Image: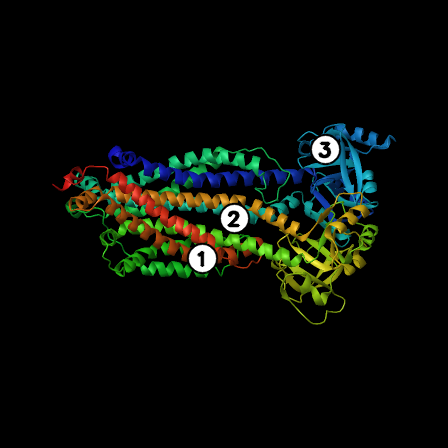
Amino acid sequence: MLDASVFGPLRHAPGRTMLAIVAIALGVALGFAIYLINRVAADEVSLAARSLFGLADLAVESNGGFAEELYPRVARIEGIEVASPVVQVEAKLIGQRRALTLLGMDAFRSRRLQPAFTRFAETLSREESGGSGKQMVYLSSSAAQGLGLAAGDILRVQVGLQPEEFEVAGVLPPAALQDRAGIIDIATAQWKFALLGRLSRINLRLAPGASHARVQQSIEKILPEGVRVVAPGQAADEALRLSRAYRSNLTALALVALFTGGFFVYSTQSLAALRRRRELALLHALGVTRREQLLLMLLGGASVGIAGALLGIVLGVVIAKLGLNVLGADLGAGFFRGIAPALQWHWLEAAVFCALGAGVAIVGTLQPALDAAQIPTAAALKSGDVASGQVRTRWPLVVALLVVAAAVLLLPPVAGLPLPGYVSIALLIVATVAAMPAILQRLLRAAPRAQSVPWEISIAHLRGTARYATLSVSAIVVSFSLMVAMAIMVMSFRSSLDAWTQRILPADLYVRAGYVGQSAHLGETEVAALRSVPGVARLEVGRFAEANLPGNLGTAVLIARDLDAAQAHRVLWLEQQIEGPMPPGAVPVWLSEAAADLLELPMGAEFDMPIGGESIKVSIRGVWRDYEHQRAVLVMERSDYVRLSGDHAVNTVWMWLEPGASVEAVQRQIRDRLPHGDYDLRTPRELRRLSLQAFDRAFAVTYALELIAILIGMFGISAGTSAQVLARRAEFGVLRHIGLTRTQIAATLAIEGAGLGGLGVAAGLVTGGLVSLILVYVVNRQSFHWSMDLFVPVGLLVTLSCALIAAAALIAVFSGRQAMREDAVRAVREDW
């Protein structure tokens, strides 16, 4: 029974069976690989952040640091057993764009929270106080490996534009410090990085039995503005929150491939059920009940799903390893640069993805199995044309799906993820597939007549085998619509980024030294030197800092730059702005779209923000488009920032040249005036090129996922067309008996393939266009909080459309040549 009903049909069509298995395997492999990379990266980030706190229960911290006088006041609070001060610096590495986290620590206090530091505490203290003049650093294992340094080597970093050297005293064991960081003496950190009298954090361990809530309340009572109490791991939570949208979108794209594979199983099982109508009817006559038949067909689908899922698990592990080696744990997006976790997976995770693959295959088999179970036994046994089948369009279902698809778009994101958008996309595609029978029948009825014999035969055949034709067209619609949507979304994002870079890079030259929180920067002396460069007409400067958002909303990037509040639209790409007088005592700020979504405040609203140890009132004057940062960003006038913080450092300089001045000559003058230090000196063209390269790297995985979804769709087209053509051997024999040549039959098949391909492409373009609107205006906006303009890659879509139509025609012709290899007499012997 099992062999006749389940395994026999799978063996009789090995090609289609293998394609179905491969389709499921690819979907499972992509989903499993991305899940593994995401999970190990998230685990690594959490461990790294937690290792910075050691055995601490709480920590007092501030982005801009705080006066060290707070330390003894906190340490004396009842319930605190150990208080360890920390100065944390993002030391800019000379010759590299990245920074290394250096932790200035009291060696003897820190070892009480991090026992792994015990054997290094005395060495570090002795070296720093021995008068040798050498500044010592202990590197974490990951930092030493990433930088290629060992004990005795020199670590070179940049403070301002000046180089500083530290001798590597040793490498910490992996268990001591998971993060990519180094340990130096706290006094050295304060001295070398101009942080005398300042601390970044105080790690706290509570006494046994002390109440966390009570101790935290006691600490908060004495904290100055801008300083907060956090639990270890909150920093990791924020880093993971910033990357969650990117990782979730990749997972959704991987599941799109699995969804396409599930639909492929549906189409192949439907075709198989139509081909086996007589066989299934015979089983009914021999005593197999309809329920047993339904279960047997579902078992066949489950067999395909389990085989594909098992293969997918193996492929997923291989892909995950390759992904970590080639793109890293950040998958090209820059979230987890420098983290190189070892790949680990568990059997339970593999079992879940196996169940997912099998479940998708079973769902894809369910409707064909139900249809097959309802075939009347007598009619099926008498039928002379088992290739036909009734097609019905359930218009109430189609309308309901479209209404729900539109309605869910009005829902807010779930846990910060655009799940309603993905649900809407799935419903829209399902509605399109459900409407295809009616669309196909209407088009076939309206097909014009022609004097061409192949044309008339192909139209007549499509009218008589509408069920097959609908399945073939639907396979094209699913794969091509997703391809079109992704192509439009990627082109829109890339083109919007290019237009944005042109708008925000109006100057002729740019100098950048360091980034948010990094030790590299330009001082007033260097800025004055740049002003005096011959050929420079004017320049503007900016500073990158960090600021705490109100409530528990985390931190934001604060950009302080030279600008005129009345002319902010000339500097920023404003999506919204408010005019009118400023509220008394308030400072104007402009929010990025991510900051505006996070704060959920209207234009003109005011809120308190700590700067320079004091809380100031700021007023929202506009919302601007920002593609550079994944986190919230606030822009304010530099004059206000300097007045409030006393920070005169500069990270970026915009330089406009005099008419006729040579860019190369000005660059040489800048290098002469800034002979020391490591900084970027770029033209707008170079910055645009680097931005687009970073975009392409971040979307490399997206391109790969899109390509795989297309391949799965092509599998569906190939399997459906070949199954239909091979089932028509007898028809080809009859046509050859009445005088048609092989060339005319091939032309008939080419017309059918091209027609179905053209209809699928047309429907895919419409559906894909609608899906792209959801991706651009809903999914992307809710995921990354970035607006973008719509750009349609017309040339690419035309090329892909023509290629897909040609492929459908060629597949039909090739399958027909295979079917016509039999002798014409033998092909029609069943009709004798």
Instruction: Residue at 60% x, 35% y: name it.
Output: 341
Secondary structure under tag 3 reads strand
- The C terminus is located in which quarter? top left
Q: Amino acid at mark 3?
A: Leu
User: Residue 742: percent from the left, percent from the top?
Assistant: 23, 43
Secondary structure under tag 1 reads helix
Which residue is the site of mark 1?
769
Q: Amino acid at mark 1?
A: Gly
Q: Decide: is 285 above or below 762.
A: above
Pick whichever of labels 3 and 1 is earlier in the sequence.
Answer: 3
Which residue is the site of mark 2?
249
Name the outermost residue toward the bottom.
580
User: Residue 13: percent from the left, percent from the top?
Assistant: 29, 36
Pick whichever of labels 2 and 3 is earlier in the sequence.
Answer: 3
Pick whichever of labels 2 and 1 is earlier in the sequence.
Answer: 2
Q: Nearer the viewer, residue 773 or 502?
A: 502
Q: Nearer the viewer, residue 396 or 686?
A: 686
Q: Nearer the viewer, mark 3 or mark 1?
A: 1
Q: Amino acid at mark 2?
A: Asn
Spatial distance from mark 3 to mark 1, Cα to Cα? 52 Å
Q: Nearer the viewer, residue 322 or 525?
A: 525
Instruction: Residue at 81% x, 50% y: name it.
Output: 526
Q: Decide: is 432 above or below 263.
A: below
Which residue is the site of mark 3?
139
